[in-house]
Amino acid sequence: MILAAAVSAFAGQLQTVVLVLFFVRDLHLSPGLVGAAIAVSGVAGVLGATMATWFTRRVGPGPAFITGMLLASTAGLVVASAAGPLPLSFSILLLAQVLRGIGPSIYGINQQTFRQAMIAPALLSRANATWRFLAYGGQSLGALAGGMLGSVLGLRATLIVSSCVMLAGTSTAVVSPLRSLRELPAQQVLDEKSAA
């Protein structure tokens, strides 16, 4: 889970730094439409947070985590496919922004829950610090790489590359035991294992 999250944090920031430039330079959106697109992502994030508990109960925490990562990972590919007349390209962009908002809410809530439920309380602060170092450190490196790739490859290509890297991070979660994790183990069992 930490590997998947760290790779996705790197690639997500790689994508984020070129996103508004792509809206303005490639899609020729007005400032008002750029603001609307960003707002849609925020509203979708709130929607994702409100439906995360229901969705997790329905499919299990592991598949919910993977689904959220998959939604977030494909958002860049959807944005990169935006082209044509403004109504069409903006509609595609809005779909991508919905994915960009809902996905991180679903996987973010579940990864936080995993850490709190599956790590012994005595180790939780160290685990959280390690996760934050990897995620936020990865974001810093991703921002730098995104700026460089955007300059060399172009904005649309950078969106595609970043989504492919995010999908690679997601694949580490898919091949892990997370894919079959339907419920979290009881904390008492975890405490007994850590005491032994």
Image (spheres, rainbow, N blue to C red):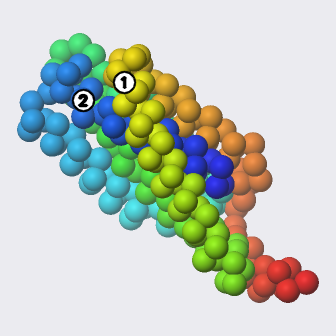
The residue under the point 16% across, 42% down is 36
**Mark 2 packing: few (<14 Cα in 10 Å), some, or many (20+)?**
some
Figure quadrant of the C terminus: bottom right
Q: Position of residue 66 (x, y in %)?
A: 60, 48
Mark drawn on residue 150: 1
User: Sequence-wise, which precedes: disc 2 or disc 1?
Assistant: 2
In the displayed structure, 21 sits above or below 105; it is above
Task: Tell me if residue 58 comes above or below residue 36 in the rendering.
Answer: below
Rendering coords of residue 158 (x, y %): 42, 24
The mark found on residue 170 in the picture is: none
What residue is shown with label 2? 21
Marks 2,1: beta carbons within 8 A? yes
Where residue 74 appears, x then y in whole percent? Answer: 47, 34
Q: Residues within 10 Å of mark 1 (few under 14, many from 20)?
A: many
Q: Which quadrant would the N terminus be assigned to in this image?
A: bottom right
- Outermost residue to the right: 196
Task: Indicate the secondary structure of the residue bearing disc 2.
Answer: helix
